Amino acid sequence: MAIYKIIGQQLIHHTHSLALQQIGSAHYRIGDQWFRVVPLGELPGSHRYAEGYKRTDPVIRRHAFLFPSFSAFPLRTLLSQWSDEEGLGDNTVLTAPIGHDDPRYGRLLTDDIGEDLSIAIGYRTDQGDLNAAILTDYRYVIVSGFRLNETVAAHVWVGYGNIVLRTTEAPAADRSQPVAQRFPKSIPLWRRVLRHFELETDVIDRGRVIG
């Protein structure tokens, strides 16, 4: 959080500052996103987010959403809430209903992914109950936009049994052409990650084309 306090003052979304503001002892705000820090003592001992808890990068709650670290929160919010800045053109390209029960989906949702391939951001909903028996896990997997000189930001969203591919890359051809020709920068990066989970064909070759 200390690093974000420094860089957040330089960030703006729709003319609004994205500086980290503290509201009370454990409540904070970034732009219009309110959240609170969840102390380690509140987490059940068996809770997934208790393991490896860092007080310098604590667990965060926003309504029913729980994030394993503060670092995950602004990244997820950037992709889900702040990616509509003028000129970004963050669009859905493909979506594929793989299903919760597919073990490949489960691995993509939870397994480690090499940092050379992506930045993975997991989070969950527990309806505000840390002891909830029914949980829904989600994950963003950023495949492009974080390396030096990359001009396209592309990611995979995993949730509700679905896999969704989004990118800022402008189509290089019309919709009558294969997606590989329309998005030549994003497709290889998506394939490289999905191939590790044997999902490449089901998502890219058989998925529903949206954009």
Image: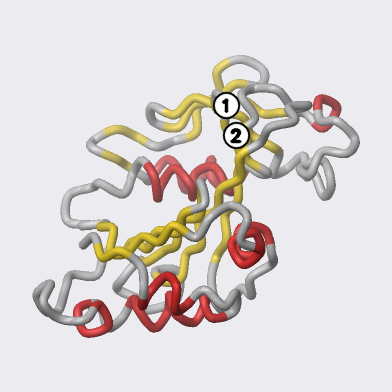
* First in residue order: circle 1 vs circle 2: 1
Residues at marks 1 and 2 touching, judged by CB atoms closer than 8 Å = yes
Kindly indicate the quadrant of the structure image that contains residue 109. bottom right
**Residue topped by disc 2:** 125
Which circle marks residue 7 in the picture?
none
Kindly indicate the quadrant of the structure image that contains residue 93. bottom left
Type of the residue with mark 2? Thr
Q: Is residue 50 above or below residue 176?
A: above
Q: In the drawing, does residue 56 fall left or right of residue 17?
A: right
Q: Is residue 156 above or below residue 26?
A: below
Q: Nearer the viewer, residue 90 or 88?
A: 90
Q: Residue at 46% x, 71% y: name it.
A: 143
> Which class describes the residues within 10 Å of circle 1: few (<14), some (14-19), or many (20+)?
few
**Residue topped by disc 1:** 64
Q: Give the quadrant of the C terminus.
A: bottom left
- Distance CA(mark 1)–CA(mark 2): 5 Å
Q: At which x and y percent is residue 104?
A: 62, 67
